[in-house]
Image (tube, rainbow, N blue to C red):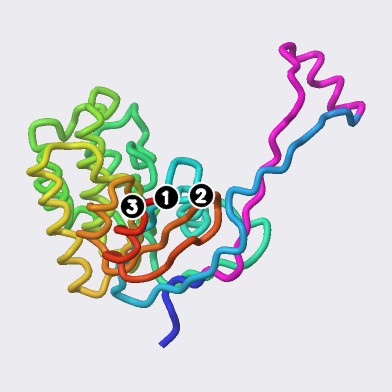
Amino acid sequence: MLPVVSVQNVSMMFRLSRNREYRVKEYLLNVLRGRLAYEEFWALRDVSFQLERGESLGLIGANGSGKSTLLKLIAGIMRPTEGKVQVRGSIAPLIEINGGFDRTLSARENIYLTGAMHGHTRAYMESRFDEIIAFAELEKFVDVPVANYSSGMLSRLGFAIATLSNADIVIADEVLSVGDARFRKKCEARMQDMLDEGTTILFVSHSAAQVEKVCRRAIWLEKGRVRMDGPSREVCRAYSQN
């Protein structure tokens, strides 16, 4: 059986400007004259791994280690500078706390909009609508613009949409860092249900204990490179003792 996610020798480079122009005119003149100076920053270097159907993988590492960049490459938001990323199946990315919502729209409108962006019909989203709202515990705020939501409410809505839309792969970045302990336990239980149903989960958290609890396997990224890949218990404990 082919892996649902295959990351092969992936590297990602960003160009950071060395220029310090504070005026638009000076910046544009340097662009026209070809005088812009850049510094290469490699967010990822030679990263490789595969994920099978129903596998749960946690990514851990310090800030700037490349975790979120890797998620964006897998989600198709960016393309790698080198290497290849292959994904087989539908993806529900929950990479930012606001889930990519249009903040001028209500929760109701954002549910249909997000569903359409993930390839779901309006009829399908209508069939899951009540379940999404109930899970997010937003029954009293369905028609309130999400600009008025707290970060916890946004996180609950984003998690509910991503995990109740029957995607083959769920990509989650720090989704359990916002909200109370009761809702975090609810999310962890939902993730376990998804794994039992064959969903593949790629999970990022600053909490090694949380990764160990949610995932069976973990990858420790350090300065854009894979330092350790193995059972989450072993990887998380090595990371915590570092």
Q: Which mark is residue 2?
A: none
Drawn side of residue 22 relative to residue 5, left or right: right
Is 64 in the magenta?
no
Say which residue appears at 58% left-offset and 54% top-offset. Answer: 44
Label 2: which residue? Answer: 66
Q: Which mark is residue 241?
A: 3
Mark 2–mark 3 Cα distance, whole angstroms, equals 20 Å
Mark 1–mark 3 Cα distance, whole angstroms, equals 12 Å
Which is nearer the N-term, disc 2 or disc 3? 2
Read off the magenta span: 7-33
Check if mark 1's residue and mark 2's residue have beta carbons within 8 Å.
Answer: yes
Front position among marks 2 and 3: 3
**Kind of residue sitting beneath label 2:** Gly
Label 1: which residue? Answer: 61
Which residue in the rendered view is the most extreme toward the bottom?
Answer: 1
Say which residue appears at 20% left-offset and 34% top-offset. Answer: 153
